[in-house]
């Protein structure tokens, strides 16, 4: 093992030996090089005042070399903020500003010890980093039966974890914290579990309420007290889009420093929060009472980034940072929030109006995010999906035999009634076929 990796491992052990035990073999072996091109370039940048012949970019006139056909379109920004490599952990100011935003929006973090957010190439990359650092073959990956399918690819297929599902909802349609606890306690012999919490949930658009949040935290705590090391990941992709009574903060704040056997990790980003999907700017943040452990995890995370993408895109980090600092940011974001809330409320009003009865479908609770899910009672979801797309020109997502996901995020409010009319017509077509 490289000596740098060994030093990081010793820092993690000293800070919390349980976290060291959570690391995968890759997680234990990875490190960020202190010697080599990056470190020597950094030293030259600081001290080589006459010529710096270390950086792997081209320069001209003291600025990164660039083409006018590109810069002409981006003339509001200096070439130095666009064309050079961003640091592996991301632009320092962006990390600081995002941390300030996180603390402002999650008051429960006020007295918690957390690391500085590290920039990722959006949220999937953040999840992939967690998978690389903490998932060994056969580790239990616990998440609900209604989930984003990329979890299986990232943790199951890539890292050979065993994906274990529990029902998202109880019979009375509240979050199934008992199911989560049962799935966790079943890992007693393994001694380790990775828990993925995604609120607002994709595909249902559900965020738990305050009491449900307490029950989720209690389940994690009970597992830790039973001797299970728990890596708990808050996938906060749709954070902030809370339209009704629900948790308005990430559970990361409640889970941070909960127990020595619990490592809380927050994955979030500008991707959906700030409506910049193609910019691919996300963040990963760790919680620990040990500053040395946080520093070591940052170094290991940078090692994963260096070994995969080297660093994230610089222009999009600049664009996001500029937006976050703008005096118009809050008002413009609130405007878009109200549009999204209006669409969600319109969907719920339509479904509760009695227009479609309750024989064809019911719907899973939704109060946030981009999506909602119908539970079909009389027809197969995939058969309906195909019928709708080929006969009505309507695209939806079929999940299993009964569930149909509809993204109201990309449908204008005045078009929603026509959309559900078409879905209902499609159900009746299949019923009468």
Image (cartoon, rainbow, N blue to C red):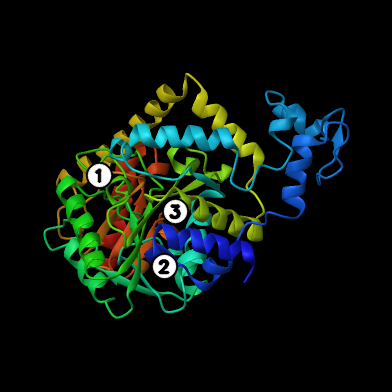
Q: Nearer the viewer, residue 184 or 275?
A: 184
Q: Which mark is residue 84?
A: none
Q: Name the residue carrying label 3.
A: 393
Instruction: Please say if the residues under marks 2 and 3 sit with CB atoms less than 8 Å apart.
Output: no
- Please give the residue where the numbered disc 1 appears in the rendered image: 367
Residue extending furthest toward the left: 172
Determine crowd level at label 2: few under 14, some 14-19, many 20+ residues with C-alpha closer than 10 A: many
Residue picked out by circle 2: 22
For mark 2, give the secondary structure.
helix
Distance (Cα) linking label 1 and label 3: 27 Å
Q: Nearer the viewer, mark 1 or mark 3?
A: 1
Q: Which is nearer the N-term, disc 1 or disc 3?
A: 1
Which image quarter holds the N terminus? bottom right
Decide if residue 138 is on the left or right side of residue 27.
Answer: left
Element carrying mark 3: loop
Front label number (2 vs 1): 2
Where residue 431 sits: x, y (%)?
25, 67
């Amino acid at each position: 093992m490289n000596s740098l990796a060994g030093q990081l491992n010793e820092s993690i052990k000293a800070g919390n030996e349980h976290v060291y035990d959570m690391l995968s073999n890759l997680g234990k072996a990875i490190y960020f090089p202190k010697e080599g091109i990056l470190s020597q370039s950094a030293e030259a940048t600081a001290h080589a005042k006459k010529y710096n012949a270390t950086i792997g970019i081209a320069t001209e006139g003291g600025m990164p070399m660039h083409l006018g056909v590109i810069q002409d379109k981006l003339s509001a920004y200096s070439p130095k903020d666009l064309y050079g490599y961003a640091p592996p952990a991301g632009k320092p100011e962006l990390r600081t500003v995002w941390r300030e935003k996180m603390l402002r929006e999650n008051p429960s973090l006020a007295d918690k010890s957390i690391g500085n957010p590290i920039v990722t190439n959006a949220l999937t990359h953040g999840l992939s980093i967690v998978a690389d650092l903490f998932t060994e073959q056969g580790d239990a990956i616990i998440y609900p039966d209604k989930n984003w399918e990329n979890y299986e690819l990232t943790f199951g297929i890539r890292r050979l974890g065993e994906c274990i599902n529990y029902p998202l909802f109880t019979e009375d349609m509240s979050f199934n914290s008992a199911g989560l606890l049962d799935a966790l306690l079943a890992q007693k012999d393994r001694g380790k579990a990775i828990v993925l919490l995604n609120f607002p949930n994709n595909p249902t658009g559900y965020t738990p309420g305050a009491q449900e949040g307490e029950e989720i935290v209690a389940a994690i705590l009970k597992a830790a007290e039973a001797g299970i090391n728990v890596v708990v990941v808050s996938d906060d992709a749709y954070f902030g889009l809370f339209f009704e009574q629900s948790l308005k903060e990430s559970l990361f704040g409640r889970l941070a420093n909960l127990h020595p056997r619990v490592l809380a990790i927050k994955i979030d980003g500008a991707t959906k929060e700030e409506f910049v999907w193609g910019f691919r700017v996300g963040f990963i943040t760790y919680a620990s009472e040990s500053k040395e452990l946080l520093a070591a995890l940052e170094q290991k995370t940078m090692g994963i980034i260096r070994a995969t993408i080297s660093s994230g895109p610089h222009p999009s980090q600049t664009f996001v940072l500029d937006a976050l600092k703008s005096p118009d940011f809050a008002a413009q974001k609130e405007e878009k929030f109200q549009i999204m809330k209006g669409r969600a409320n319109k969907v719920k009003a339509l479904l509760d109006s009695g227009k479609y009865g309750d024989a064809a479908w019911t719907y899973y609770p939704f109060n946030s995010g981009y999506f909602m899910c119908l539970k079909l009672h009389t027809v197969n979801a995939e058969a309906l999906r195909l019928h709708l797309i080929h006969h009505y020109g309507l695209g939806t997502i079929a999940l299993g035999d009964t569930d149909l996901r509809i993204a109201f995020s990309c449908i204008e409010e005045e078009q929603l009634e026509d959309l559900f009319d078409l879905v209902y017509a499609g159900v009746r077509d299949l019923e009468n076929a």
